[in-house]
């Protein structure tokens, strides 16, 4: 289940860092802990995007100038989403960075047909390697065109599906088909223009700062439909509950909405 949450922005021109997933993750965790359902206090089977709106870019980060700001939030658990929304909309105001946001409304995203071959776009970076304190291993670069890239994501996806309790162990053994094929034309174009599809990003866990390498590029994934659906609803890779690994289906109706947002450099 994927929903789009709409906030009113009280202070236009306010900003957040370029990568503000860690601020959103702290806010989501805080809201979950505000509620009265302790069974969700350690729940991590969910995913979310960055904030979207009309923005200008400065050295400080992303300045929002639209009257409304949106956030895509997703989980396979409808019950958890309903719980999260009930707590969120009980708040008069949410502070993300310098943004003063007022929860206004939410709507389900339009249903997208998910099959066994899906071309995905990255809404937020995909993390392949678990981070650990004072260890550079989490920042290691892995080529998207090698088998290791797919293998790491497969192992992580199967572990998360098993942890969700929704898939019996004998069923998971049937999900052995899993191959990610990066968009070669996109990677060539990025390299030609000297841009990056892999960057180092900050995240926080138990108030400790970690750094991880995240990847952002289009790709086609070949996997059984239940696996594709799980990834679409819960994200791909490590730290989905911290805003990493959110995907959208190429040519889906939700993609133009986000790409049409104005972006101006100052």
Image (tube, rainbow, N blue to C red):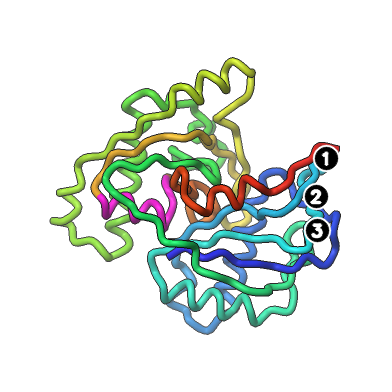
In this rendering, the answer to whether 205 lies above or below 144 is below
Answer whether labels 1 and 2 touch (C-beta < 8 Å).
yes
- Tell me the residue that label 2 is attached to: 63
Residue 191 or residue 90, whichever sits in front: 191
Instruction: Identify the residue shown where x is 85% and y is 54%.
Output: 13
The image's mark for residue 98 is: 3
Q: CA distance from mark 3 to mark 1?
A: 14 Å
Q: CA distance from mark 1 to mark 2?
A: 7 Å
| Residue 7 screen position, x and y as percent | 69, 67
Answer whether labels 3 and 1 touch (C-beta < 8 Å).
no
Instruction: Identify the residue shown where x is 65% and y is 82%.
Output: 90
Q: CA distance from mark 3 to mark 2?
A: 9 Å
Which region shows up in magenta?
A: 225-236
| Residue 58 screen position, x and y as percent | 83, 40
Per the image, label 1 sits on a secondary structure element best described as strand
- Give whichever of discs 1 and 2 has the lower sequence position: 1
43 sits left or right of 173 in the view: right
- Give whichever of discs 3 and 1 has the lower sequence position: 1
In this rendering, the answer to whether 252 lies above or below 134 is below
| Residue 57 screen position, x and y as percent | 79, 41
């Amino acid at each position: 289940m994927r929903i789009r949450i709409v906030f009113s922005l009280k202070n236009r021109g306010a900003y957040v860092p370029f990568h503000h997933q860690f601020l959103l993750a702290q806010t989501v965790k805080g809201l979950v802990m505000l509620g009265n359902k302790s069974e969700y206090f350690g729940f991590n089977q969910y995913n979310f995007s960055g904030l979207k709106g009309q923005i200008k870019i400065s050295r400080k980060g992303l300045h929002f100038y639209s009257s409304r700001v949106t956030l895509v939030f997703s989980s396979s658990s409808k019950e958890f989403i309903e719980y999260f929304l009930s707590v969120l909309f009980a708040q008069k105001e949410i502070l993300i960075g310098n943004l003063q946001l007022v929860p206004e409304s939410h709507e389900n995203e339009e249903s997208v047909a998910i099959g066994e071959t899906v071309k995905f776009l990255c809404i937020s970076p995909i993390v392949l390697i678990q981070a650990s304190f004072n260890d550079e291993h989490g920042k290691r670069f892995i080529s998207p065109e090698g088998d290791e890239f797919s293998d790491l994501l497969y192992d992580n996806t199967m572990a998360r599906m098993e942890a969700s309790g929704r898939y019996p162990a004998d069923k998971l053994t049937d999900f052995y088909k899993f191959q990610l094929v990066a968009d070669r034309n996109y990677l060539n174009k990025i390299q030609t223009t000297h841009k990056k599809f892999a960057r180092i990003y900050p995240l926080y866990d138990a108030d400790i700062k970690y750094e991880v390498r995240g990847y952002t590029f289009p790709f086609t994934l070949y996997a059984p439909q239940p696996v594709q659906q799980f990834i679409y609803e819960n994200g791909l890779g490590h730290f989905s509950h911290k805003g990493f690994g959110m995907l959208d289906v190429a040519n889906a109706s939700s993609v133009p909405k986000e790409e049409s947002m104005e972006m101006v450099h100052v």
